[in-house]
């Protein structure tokens, strides 16, 4: 009986090891996907750093109007924000799950060494598909979508966050935007 119990635990350990290896491989696959989608935008599409700065400024102005401290614009999560904006544009969807099936949490895990160092994170995503000139008014329209949506507004004005990265991609007269928010990282993860 003792031998059977030992065999049982050995099998459990092997299965857990295989599961962990599969998760690492899947994560590496998403990081490669994200890098390629940012690097290889379709010919008519482009990232708009000017609108990224405007949208970040509009978001901080709104936070200030709501009695919140402004967030610090930081490029730490710019690559995943741009990857998700580009993915939504290329695959014609809007949401928080990538076309690969990776949700927000699994997407963020591949961009940091230890996700437990980041106690609070959130994401806002939107698009403006009006056939109007691409400029400051589109950035304001995206912000207004987030303000009008209770869960997105909550992320936008939350006191839980100190930093954010903002991505905007344009194709024709449409833009897709993503903001990733996070709290001040811990010096060490929970399991270090």
Image (cartoon, rainbow, N blue to C red):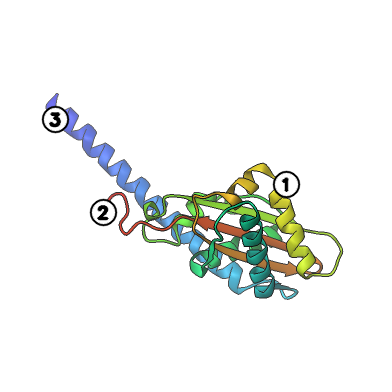
Q: Is residue 92 visible?
A: no
Label 2 or label 3, whichever comes before in sequence order: 3
Of marks 2 and 3, the one in the foreground:
2
Tell me where residue 79 sits by quadrant: bottom right
Label 2 or label 1, whichever comes before in sequence order: 1
Residue 192's tag is 2
| Left or right: 85 as drawn, with respect to 107 | right
Residue 166 in picture, x, y percent from top left: 60, 64
Residue 94 in picture, x, y percent from top left: 69, 52
Disc 3 target residue: 3
**Residue at horizontal 14%, vertical 23%?**
1
Give the camera-side residue of 124 and 143.
143
Number of numbered callouts drawn: 3
Residue 81 in picture, x, y percent from top left: 58, 62
* Mark 2 crowdedness (10 Å alpha carbons): few <14, some 14-19, many ≥20: few
Of marks 3 and 1, the one in the foreground:
1
Give the camera-side residue of 169 and 117.
117
- Figure check: 37 above or below 63: below
Residue 148's tag is 1
* Mark 3 crowdedness (10 Å alpha carbons): few <14, some 14-19, many ≥20: few
- Figure check: 120 above or below 38: above
Direction right: furthest residue: 131
The Cα–Cα distance between marks 2 and 1, rounded to whole angstroms, is: 40 Å
Please tell me whether mark 1 sits on a helix, a strand or a loop: helix
Of marks 2 and 1, the one in the foreground:
1
């Amino acid at each position: 009986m003792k031998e059977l119990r030992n065999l049982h635990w050995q099998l459990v350990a092997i299965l857990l090891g295989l599961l962990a290896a599969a998760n690492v491989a899947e994560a590496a696959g998403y990081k490669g996907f994200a890098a390629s989608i940012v690097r290889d935008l379709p010919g008519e599409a482009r990232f708009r750093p000017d609108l990224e700065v405007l949208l970040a400024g509009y978001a901080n102005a709104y936070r200030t109007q709501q009695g919140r401290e402004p967030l610090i614009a930081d490029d730490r999560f710019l690559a995943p924000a741009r990857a998700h904006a580009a993915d939504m544009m290329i695959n014609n969807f809007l949401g928080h799950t990538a076309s690969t099936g990776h949700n927000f949490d699994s997407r963020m895990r591949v961009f940091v060494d230890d996700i437990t160092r980041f106690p609070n994170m959130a994401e806002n995503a939107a698009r403006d598909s009006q056939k109007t000139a691409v400029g400051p008014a589109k950035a304001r329209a995206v912000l207004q979508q987030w303000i009008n949506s209770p869960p997105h507004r909550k992320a936008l004005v939350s006191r839980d966050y100190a930093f954010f990265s903002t991505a905007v991609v344009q194709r024709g007269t449409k833009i897709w935007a993503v903001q990733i928010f996070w709290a001040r990282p811990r010096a060490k993860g929970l399991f270090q």
